[in-house]
Amino acid sequence: MATNHLLKIKEYGQSIWMDNLSRDIIQSGELRDLVENQGIAGITSNPAIFEKAIVGNVIYDADIEAGVRAGLPTYKIYESLIFADIRSACDILRPVYESSNYLDGYVSIEVPPTIAHDTQATIAEARRYFQEIGRENLMIKIPGTEAGLPAVEQAISEGINVNITLLFSVESYVNTAWAYIRGLEKRLQEGKDISKIASVASFFLSRIDNNIDAKIDAKLKKGVDDINLEAKLRAVQGKVAIANAKIAYQEYKKIIESDASGGQSQRWQALAAKGAKVQRLLWASTSTKNPNYSDVMYVDELIGKDTVNTLPPTTIKACADHCNVGVGEDGRHPIETDVDEAYKLIENLKDPDININLDTVMDELLTEGIDKFIQPFQSLMNSLEEKIKVLSPV
């Protein structure tokens, strides 16, 4: 029997989640098979995924008609559809949740992307989603915006599992990690249990390389006379996202490792002693967009302890077939190899010949990321409006 590399990855302390959800895969039994036989240990969703799942799919028509008969507005019909799918997925993943001691088995649902810059609205929707869906193994996705982080802290303090999404910069990840810690500290001060709360920090990858590669291509198209300069520019392409992720992982280690000198990590150690779970880095946006790159490069190079990789179905199939799962000659996991080179690569972006401001790139990507969720969300609302008109009784 051929090796399923997805199952091998688990041996290195990394969980594989799937970046996809629809009623089709729930009802067909495909999702259950992925969970029970392929090692899929969680599900993430977003407005773009739900748009693809619902628009033009008759499997939802009966529930839409029921919503129409009940006199529900479009947004409530939308929620009834996605909440039902989320509950079903949570139930399928419940055994994973229990057998992993509440570390895996989660299904993520995002608060409306239109409130990404509204702290209080985000907190209110996180509470409502968690209560109405009514599953312990639910994670609420909150964007890692300036307004989102206080919402993360509050949600964690209330016992709501949180997936912080749209993280691009290392600084944004670190801020997210401390928001999680502050939320746990607040909950602990209130005398409440923190041992069953989980969180992941979703660090986006391929979008970073797409953005920077386009900038490099633009420079090359203008013409480069010096062959060494051309080589310098090409050496950056397809490398920044993974380097950035490896640096983020080093920051994660600084936060959680014990510090005898009395540093910040003692705050985490105090929480860990009370049963707190680490907030794992989750690699998101892992489908390779450039056909010249390996279709599993964002998997192979980022395998490591206490991490999650969330893959779309095409990457799951590719990885099961030909991921290169293993450790380096020195026994280190891939996430911990070539770390010095990662720091150098990021520093080289400041070279006058390359001149790419990574902070600006990250800001651009966050803005674009929110828009990429708002657009399909609004498109889905419009499509539902049209379907409601067709299905409404005359």
Image (tube, grey):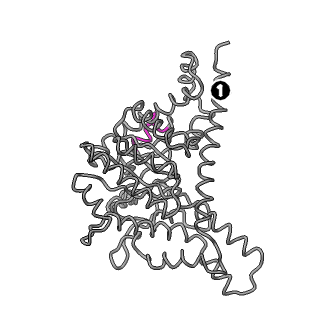
Check if residue 30 falls in the magenta segment: yes
| Closest to the observer, 96 or 123 | 123
| Closest to the observer, 117 or 370 | 117
| Closest to the observer, 155 or 287 | 155
Q: Answer above or below: position of 357 versus 133.
A: below
Mark 1 is on which residue type? Lys
Check if residue 181 falls in the magenta segment: no
| Segment colored magenta | 25-33
Q: Is residue 50 left or right of residue 193?
A: right
Number of numbered labels in the structure image: 1
Question: Residue under circle 1?
Answer: 387
Q: Residue at x 45, y 79 (%)?
A: 340
- Which residue is the extreme one toward the right? 222
Q: Residue at x 51, y 36 (%)?
A: 24
Residue 12 locus on image (x, y percent): 33, 63
- For the C terminus, the image quarter is top right
**Which structural element holds mark 1?**
helix
- For the N terminus, the image quarter is bottom left
